[in-house]
Image (cartoon, helix red, strand yellow):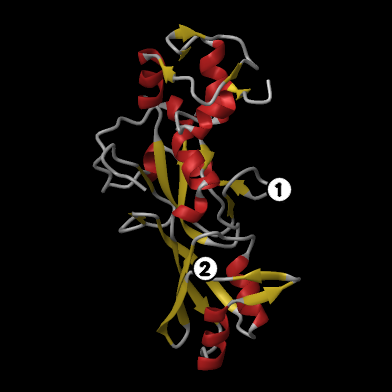
Amino acid sequence: MTDTLRLSKRMTELGLCSRREADEFIEMGLVRVDGEVVDVLGSRVRPDQQIELTRQAMAMQADRVTILLNKPVGYAAGLSENGEWPAWMLIKPETRSASDRSGYAFLKKHLNQLAPAGKLDVDSSGLLVLTQDGRIARKLIADAADFEQEYLVGLDGDVSEAALARLAAGVTVDDELLKLARVSRQSDRQLRVLLRDSHKRQIRRMADAVGLRVTEVRRIRVGRIALGDLAQGQWRYLRPEERF
């Protein structure tokens, strides 16, 4: 059995779905291995075996939505830890952006199992991706380093060339080397920061280490998806043709 692995794990490795979806599809009998239905959780497969989803499973995936939200400060991206409002509560008909041209009708079922695909601190604002699609969640979380994130960072005070150089070179904080993909000056008191493999409160920790005080962190892009004209507190659906 050393050359086999769990079917659900193999499905996620192949990018067919998330681990949670894999278990769901297996239990429903919607997964075939070498043409045969496998409906037992914990089943194991060899790397060379062919795994495919049934048409029903693919239709279920196609029916799952991804939502782009311009999250305000004070809302938790995921589960609320300190009494903050969870960001998903902003997803309602009256806060939908008038610029949404996805063609989707808002349905209450679109809130079912809607989860953040990545982190955004409570005291940060900007683009938050919420999705029902395990494939998108896996890409943006497990393969986060493949998707560039762009931020605008406001500062209380001017940025010196020395501080900018230190940020560009990387900063060690609490014995952890933190690096930015790129950092540039937008104005005397604003930076443009690009991240790939982000760490908890990375921008604020790095800025503090070089003597800068952050007043605002706003994410304006994830991969190829930009915040655009989405107003704060509003949301829209990811269109079928859009890709991260």
Q: Residue at x 62, y 75 (%)?
A: 206
174 vs 100, left or right, is right
Q: Residue at x 51, y 47 (%)?
A: 143
Image quarter for residue 73? bottom right
Q: Which residue is disc 2 drawn over?
A: 217
Q: In front: 40, or 150?
A: 40
Q: Amino acid at mark 2?
A: Val
144 vs 84, left or right, is left
User: What numbered label is drawn on residue 81?
Assistant: 1
As helix, strand or loop, the secondary structure at mark 2 comes to strand
Residue 105 placement (x, y as % from top left): 30, 30
Residue 20 placement (x, y as % from top left): 57, 27
Q: Earlier in the sequence, mark 2 or mark 1?
A: 1
Specify the quadrant that holds the N terminus.
top right
As helix, strand or loop, the secondary structure at mark 1 comes to loop
Whether 231 is drawn above or below 216: the answer is above
Q: Residue at x 65, y 72 (%)?
A: 205
Distance from disc 2 to disc 1, alpha carbons, whole Å, reads 20 Å
Q: Residue at x 48, y 29 (%)?
A: 17
Residue 218 placement (x, y as % from top left): 47, 65
Q: Amino acid at mark 1?
A: Glu
